[in-house]
Amino acid sequence: MDTPTPPPQPARRSAPQPPPQPWSAPAEVPGPAGPPDPTGLPEPAVLAGPDGPWGGADVWATVDALRVWLDDNRAHGGSEDLLLRVLKLSEEVGEVAQAVIGATGQNPRKGADHTWADVQAELCDVVITALVVLRTLTPDAPTVFAGHLARVAHRSLGEPGGRPT
């Protein structure tokens, strides 16, 4: 009597990987001037660094210029445009997460495909996008932001030299 042939097993894509090691942030997160990127990927382009055309420009004047540029080039109007700008903020936060995953090598298929400079750039994109959305909501964005920052600082830090409230 012949022994039955076992069904074929699915092919493994790669050898089993060891369990992930605990991760901790580097003591000093390198910026664009940090050590060479071991992945060989280029650093994010510095289009408006200290020596660029927008270097040293007032933050709120730049935010307002970006808002005007978006207003002049929008595909949708009214409340739909505002909603899409808020959604853009969520997209940018997702890109921060993607960069952190890439910088820490947490995706075994991709490995370390981002740098900490990429994370810094994506965080800046989140801040810029948030400021543009705030400016879209109110022409008094600098005052609104400064007031809210002061309230958060007081709540968390208390009076200068004092305790949190």
Image (cartoon, rainbow, N blue to C red):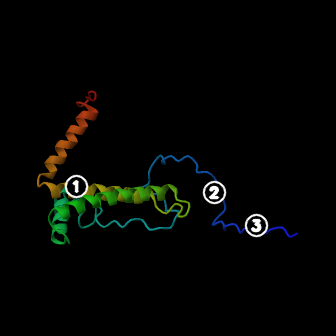
Q: In whole angstroms, how far apart are the C-alphas of marks 2 and 1?
A: 42 Å
**Element under disc 1:** helix
Residue density around tag 3, few if under 14, some if 14–19, many if 20 or more, within 10 Å: few
Which badge, 3 or 2, is on the more N-terminal residue?
A: 3
**Place of residue 152 in the rendered image (x, y in percent of width and height, measured from the top left):** 24, 39
Query: At 65% across and 65% down in the image, what residue appears?
Result: 12
**Residue contact at pointers 2 and 1, CB within 8 angstroms:** no
* Residue 90 at x, y percent in the picture: 32, 57
Question: Which residue type carries mark 1?
Answer: Leu
Q: Which residue is mark 3?
A: 6
- Which residue type carries mark 2? Gln
The residue under label 1 is 131
Badges 3 and 1: C-beta atoms under 8 Å apart? no
Q: Give the quarter of the figure containing the C terminus.
A: top left
Q: CA separation, marks 3 and 2?
A: 26 Å
Q: Label 1: how many residues lie within 10 Å, few (<14), some (14-19) or many (20+)?
A: many
Give above or below for 77 relative to 98.
Answer: below
> Which quadrant of the view contains residue 147?
top left
- Secondary structure category for the residue under label 3: loop
Please tell me in which quadrant of the rendered image residue 98 appears.
Answer: bottom left
Q: Mark 3 to mark 1: distance in Å? A: 62 Å
**Residue under the image location 23 percent in, 34 percent down:** 154
Residue 4, which numbered label? none
Quarter where residue 111 is shown:
bottom right
Q: Label 2, secondary structure: give it.
A: loop
Residue drawn at point x = 19 percent, y = 72 percent: 73
